[in-house]
Each structure stands twice: as structure tokens, then as C-alpha cells.
Image: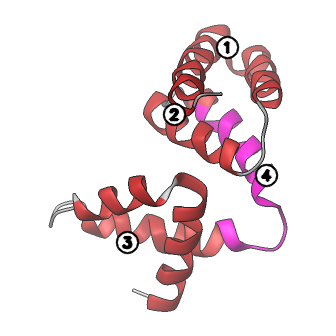
Amino acid sequence: MNQELFDKGLKTRREVLGAEYVDASLKNADDFNMDMQEHVTQYCWGDVWNRPGLERRTRSFLNLAMITALNRPHELKLHVRGAINNGLTKEEIKEVFLQAAIYCGVPAAIDSFRVAKEVFKEMGI
């Protein structure tokens, strides 16, 4: 493991997703899934999320669309929070899901709207 990249990724991951969530994910990791936690933190968050080509806000737009396309509600919930933390508005998130409905399918977008409403309620937005 590249400790420098992991540490950089851990910082970014905490800033985007929230320290409480990230710290719980690492604390609850065991021998089976700790390697995955390290992999995600180092490569996704340490490397790709810190590349200079896109701002975090743009990366959040992309993530919401791609996760909607893949219909992964657990990850979507997490990344709606991250998108809010990266400055996206409810209106912008709504537009992402409407766009995704056309290209990814209405059922996937409906699930995304449902998940986002849960997050907005939890965050008091």
C-alpha cells in the first residue's frame, strides 16, 4: 500500500463523505474487506478524486449519474451527501436524475429521487 496516497485519499474521502461515515467504514472493516477499504481509499479517493482535471463538484455530478445508471441505491445515498458537501444544490441533483431518466431508464431515476429525498430529510435540506 502507498501510505502517502492512502492518507491523501482518507482526507478527501472524509471531506466529501463525512468523517463519521468513513471512520465507521474503516473501524468496521475486518480481515475479509479491509483490503477493499484500503484499495478504495488509496486509488479512488487518493488518486482519481485528487487528479487536477475535474473539480470535486463535477466529479459529484458524474457520480450521481453513473450510480443512477448502475442503480446502486446504497452508494447513491452516500454520494448524494457527498454532492451536497461538494456544493451541488437540490435543483442540480434533480436535473441529474431527470437527465439520467432519459438515458438510463425511468425506474433507475425514480429510485434515485427516492434515495435523495431520504438524504435531504436526514440533512434537513
Q: Earlier in the sequence, mark 3 or mark 4?
A: 3
Nearer to the camera, 114 or 32: 114
Q: Mark 1 = which residue?
A: 105
> Which label sits on residue 57?
4
Q: Measure how far apart labels 4 and 2 are at the Cα level.
A: 16 Å
How far apart marks 3 and 1 lie (CA) works out to 33 Å
Q: Tell me the chief SS of the magenta region.
A: helix
Instruction: Name the element at disc 2.
Output: helix
Disc 1 secondary structure class:
loop
Amino acid at dot 2: Lys
* Quarter-of-image position of residue 96: top right
Q: Earlier in the sequence, mark 3 or mark 1?
A: 3
Closest to the camera, between mark 3 and mark 4, is 4
* Disc 3 target residue: 38
Q: Secondary structure at mark 3?
A: helix
Q: CA distance from mark 3 to mark 4?
A: 24 Å
Mark 4 surroundings: few (<14), some (14-19) or many (≥20) residues within 10 A? some
What is the number of the mark on residue 77? 2
